[in-house]
Image (cartoon, rainbow, N blue to C red):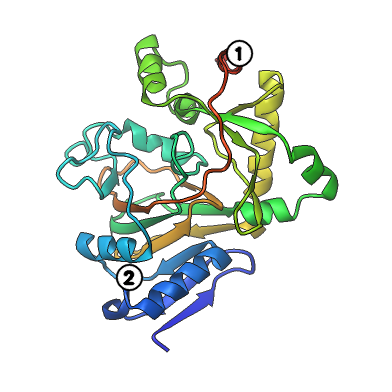
Amino acid sequence: MTVRIEPIKPLIGGIVHVDKAHLTDPDVVEAIRHALEDRGILLFPQINVSDAEQLALTDALGERVNFTRSVPGSDVSAPDVYKITLDRKLNSEPDYVLGTFFWHVDGVTIDQPLPKATLLSARQLSSEGGATEFANLYAAYDRLSDKDKQAYEELRVIHTIEAAVRPVFGIPPEERLARWRSMAEPMEQPLVWRHEDGRKSLLLGTHGDGIVGWPGPNGRSLLWRLMQWAAQPDFVYTHEWTPGDLVIWNNQGLMHRVVPYTDQGRVMHRTTIAGEEKPGHVAPTEHMTKMLEPVY
């Protein structure tokens, strides 16, 4: 066989054994697509892809998309490869990267189908920290009690950039608040995502800022408790990086975060595959937006 995929844990993760020369072969691409649905996150150990090779695999798996083109610090010379780093020579505004220390789903605050998958390759590593944790939101939903599933089925959540970066900055100045709010409107998404293939998953992350119709503290409390539930060890794979590693994960069914680091030498290259599904969001009303005014 050209490709072999070895499970990492019962509920999440797979190691892909394949020669880099065959990475974009049709049978390998099909095997990767299938495994992403089954395993959630796939590791290609020390495969050492170049940007061109990473983009070629991205294109083979689906349509590439760059939803961070307007993010401060993005490299306009390579718009489809986002450099995740605290090094200001490579990313002029790395503060945005600090938000990745907290659980999140890529693209959830943007009015477009959520990216289907993300590819991340390790170019340089930090001396401490920097591991990436992935939590299976399909498994987190499947193992809820029937009572909880029924209670959460119709709940809707407001997601904002402001909530995503609030843990980074604490009490921000008004100028920074205005900047965050100008980047994207608050998005209303279902708590339980009914996917087109019939499966269901939770849709969670630090960007969740409240539940429609609930008092702010009550909604945020439930969302934080559900993130704790989804982050239990059985649902999580933690990847300790080695230079040259490549991982791909199903962004529509996993949340992820990085273990904090301070080393400016850590550099990761990210590319993204476009999605076709929207979870079923609508723009929040003015009343909903006011309901979510933060209390610091």
Badge 1 element: helix
* Residue shown at the point (49%, 27%) measured from the top left: 160
Q: Residue 270: horizontal and vertical position, in percent? A: 32, 52
The disc placed on residue 63 is none
Mark found first going from the N terminus, 2 or 1: 2
Number of on-image labels: 2
Left or right: 219, with 14 as reference point = right
The N terminus - image quarter: bottom left
Q: Residue at x 31, y 73 (%)?
A: 24
Left or right relative to 161: residue 208:
right
Q: Quadrant of residue 76?
A: top left
Q: What kind of residue is marked 1? A: His
Could you tell me which residue is drawn at 38 percent across and 64 percent down?
A: 61
Q: Residue at x 31, y 58 (%)?
A: 122
Q: Label 1, on which residue?
A: 287
Occupied quadrant, residue 161 = top left
Query: Label 2: which residue?
Result: 46
Expressed as whole percent of the image width and height from the top left, the position of residue 235 reads: 63, 57
In the rendered image, residue 100, in percent from the top left (x then y), is placed at 43, 40
Q: Amino acid at mark 2?
A: Gln
